[in-house]
Image: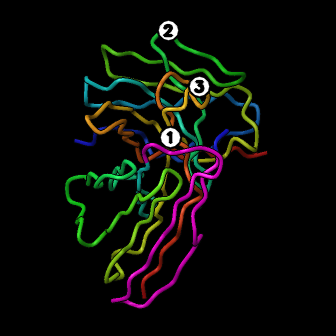
Amino acid sequence: GAVVSQHPSWVICKSGTSVKIECRSLDFQATTMFWYRQFPKQSLMLMATSNEGSKATYEQGVEKDKFLINHASLTLSTLTVTSAHPEDSSFYICSASSLDARLAGRSSYNEQFFGPGTRLTVL
Amino acid sequence: RKEVEQDPGPFNVPEGATVAFNCTYSNSASQSFFWYRQDCRKEPKLLMSVYSSGNEDGRFTAQLNRASQYISLLIRDSKLSDSATYLCVVNMDMEYGNKLVFGAGTILRVKS
């Protein structure tokens, strides 16, 4: 299967600082990358969808000026949490999908391959 | 109303038991359906797709009822390693690509 990595796996920062999280597709070119957030005992919530070379599409209620997404290449997307506050503490997960038919796998849809997640704690 | 609803559980079952999870979704325009498995503090992993005709993968059987907007997952002969949170997921085609909508998950604990 396709491999997606995230860095860092966990981060602790002070309130008011900015944190950058990287998402990389290691063995395929990701046409689209997705950023999710998961609070404890809650479902994954899609924050934004980004296509390489274009602006990200943010879900309703997600502040685009606070959560900056850059998808500069087909293998890398970054999420920057600006001026982080304790309420931003969460599990951030990225996923990547490709139009490469070889990755179609078991399902007919454009499968998303998930990174291992980044646990952010803001003090 | 949540877009995808699941019973949070937990379901505590002995090894070897059969357990069933249910899920309902609200958007009739949903295109495709899945069950994912998520272990504690890990990313979700695709378990299986769900089709109207029903599909089976070893001990796992999934079923979709489009008319009732209802999805199910049956696990037979439960193993300790099946302990996890099972996420019901609905895919919708958007202008910008696929959008996966996740349920909050059902916790399964299999005990010896």
A74 relative to A67 in the view: left or right: right
What residue lies at 51% left-to-right and 84% top-to-bottom?
A12
Q: How is the image coloured?
A: rainbow
What residue lies at 73% left-to-right and 46% top-to-bottom?
B111
- Residue B47 locus on image (x, y percent): 60, 34
Which mark is on residue A112?
1
- Residue B53 locus on image (x, y percent): 50, 8
From the image, tell me which residue sits under label 2. B53
Answer with mark 3 or mark 2, whichever residue precedes in sequence.
2
Amino acid type, mark 2: Ser
| Whether residue B62 is situated above or below residue A54 in the rendered picture | above
> As rendered, which of A85 and B95 lies closer to the eye?
B95
Which mark is on residue B74?
3
- Tell me which segment is drawn in magenta: A3-32
Q: Are marks 1 and 2 on the same chain?
A: no
Image quadrant in which you'd find residue A1: top right
Marks 3 and 2 close (CB-CB < 8 Å) = no
Q: Which residue is situated farthest in the top direction here?
A: B53
Q: CA distance from mark 1 to mark 2?
A: 23 Å
Question: Mark 1 falls on what kind of element?
Answer: loop
The chain under label 2 reads B
Question: Mark 3 falls on what kind of element?
Answer: strand
- Residue A48 locus on image (x, y percent): 32, 54
| Whether residue B108 is situated above or below residue B94 in the rendered picture | below
B74 relative to B66 in the view: left or right: right
Q: Residues within 10 Å of mark 3 (few under 14, many from 20)?
A: some
Amino acid type, mark 3: Leu
